Image: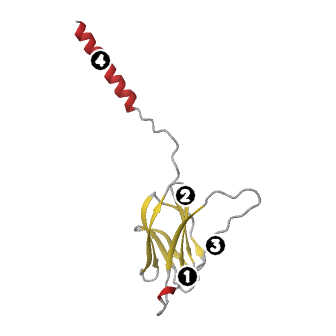
Amino acid sequence: MRTGFACLLATAALVLAALLVGCGGGGGPTLPDPIIRFVNSSPDSNPLDYFIDTDKKAAALTYLTDSAEVTTKKGDKDISVQDSTNQAELDAVAFTFAQDNKYLAITVGLENYGAETLKRLRLLAFQYDKNPPNGSRARLLIVHGFM
């Protein structure tokens, strides 16, 4: 009888330990998804479509226009830009997105660069500080896009 009680007590202790270990909680705060904005800064381009992997995130952006902020999932992604009139892919970059960050993807250069390949259209993507500046200060994002 004594071994049966000890066995029952050991089983109850194991079940209690399993319940305590199994309760991982995970109720901490979740960080927001990454946010990206697209800008067409190519002066001779047709309207441009912007993609993350195969998902179109911005459509038919003309010169000096930008998209609304869009969200994506964190991780490694491909960002690409296509001419919206003929769906020709003009450039693509591999990029890693992190949660709770803002990004900008901007095209610079020329779609019709002729023999000057250094002036060809390129897609630049980078992270910027999403926190507002303090006091009476301002934050400027300057991209030198001259090729």
CA separation in Å, label 4 and label 1: 73 Å
Pick the residue in front: 61 or 112: 112
CA separation in Å, label 3 and label 2: 18 Å
Q: Quadrant of residue 42?
A: bottom right
Dot 4: element: helix
Report the residue marked by disc 3: 142
CA separation in Å, label 4 and label 3: 68 Å
Residue contact at pointers 4 and 3, CB within 8 angstroms: no
The residue located at (68%, 64%) in the rendering is 139
> Which badge, 4 or 3, comes first in the chain's sequence?
4
Residue contact at pointers 4 and 1, CB within 8 angstroms: no
Residue that sits furthest to the top in the current view: 1
> Which badge, 3 or 1, comes first in the chain's sequence?
1
The residue located at (72%, 56%) in the rendering is 134
User: In the displayed structure, does residue 64 sit left or right of residue 98?
Assistant: right
Q: Position of residue 52 (x, y in %)?
A: 44, 67
Q: Is the residue marked by circle 2 packed among few (<14), some (14-19), or many (20+) residues within 10 Å? A: some
User: What amino acid does circle 2 point to?
Assistant: Asn
CA separation in Å, label 2 and label 1: 25 Å
> Which badge, 3 or 2, comes first in the chain's sequence?
2
> Which badge, 4 or 1, comes first in the chain's sequence?
4
Report the residue marked by disc 2: 101
